[in-house]
Structures are given as C-alpha cells and as structure tokens.
C-alpha cells in the first residue's frame, strides 16, 4: 500500500514538473489583437406573421352518471395528541407485567 502511494505521488510530481517545461506554464509577452466578428446583414422591415392562437379549440366533455372524486372524499379529522397519549397509556395498563425480577 505504501509503495503504490509513493509511486502515485512520484508520478503526480513528475507530471507537474513536466507541464512547466513544455512552455504551457508561462504567458507570452506578445499582444493579441481582438477581432470582433462582423455581421453584414442588418435589420430590415418584414411583414408580421399570421396570428396563431395558443389556446386549444376543445369543447368541455360531460359524462352522464359520473361524479367527481371530491364528492366521495371525506375530510379526515386529525386525532389530538392528548387522546393518542391516553390510548397508549391504557394499552400499557392492559398488558401483563413481568412476574420475574432479575437483580444483579
């Protein structure tokens, strides 16, 4: 494990030193002229496109004898936390208690 870690570090160090000797590590002093691309076509007047509707041309559908789902849903009543605690306490009292006590 130590040998592979040492070889990996040696390889990374060699790669780091190899980059600086190829000339990519230093910036040149030669100025570079920035040339903006030209666009020979300028804006021109054209007729507007035909009007298009974004809305669908659909008719609402109605079926006979069907009721929406929310007619069947019953609103759920949340059980208060106190009632839940009382029910758990009653369940604990109903359970049988251990008859054998172990003391160390």
Image: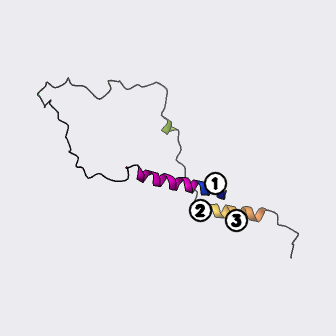
Magenta range is 8-34
10 magenta-colored: yes
Earlier in the chain: of badge 1 and badge 2, it is 1
Report the disc number at residue 4: 1
Q: Is residue 49 visible?
A: yes
Q: Disc 2 on helix, strand or loop? A: helix
Q: How many marks?
A: 3
Circle 1/circle 3 CB separation < 8 Å? no
Q: Residue furthest left?
A: 45
Q: Quick check: 101 left or right of 29? A: right
- Check the picture and name the quadrant holding the N terminus: bottom right
Q: Closer to us: mark 1 or mark 2?
A: 1
Q: Which mark is residue 89?
A: 3
**Which mark's residue is nearer the viewer, 1 or 3?**
1
Numbered badge on residue 81: 2
**Gap between marks 1 and 3 measured at Cα:** 62 Å
* Sequence-first tag of 2 and 3: 2
**Image location of residue 33, percent across then percent down:** 20, 45
Front residue (pair 61, 56): 56
């Amino acid at each position: 494990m130590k040998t592979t870690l040492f070889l990996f570090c040696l390889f990374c160090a060699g790669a780091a030193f190899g980059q600086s000797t190829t000339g990519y590590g230093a910036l040149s002093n030669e100025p570079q002229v920035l040339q903006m691309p030209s666009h020979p076509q300028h804006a021109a007047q054209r007729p507007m496109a035909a009007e298009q509707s974004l809305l669908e041309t659909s008719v609402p559908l109605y079926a006979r004898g069907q009721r929406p789902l929310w007619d069947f849903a019953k609103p759920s009543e949340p059980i208060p936390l106190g009632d839940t605690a009382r029910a758990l306490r009653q369940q604990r009292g109903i359970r049988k208690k251990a008859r054998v006590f172990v003391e160390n």
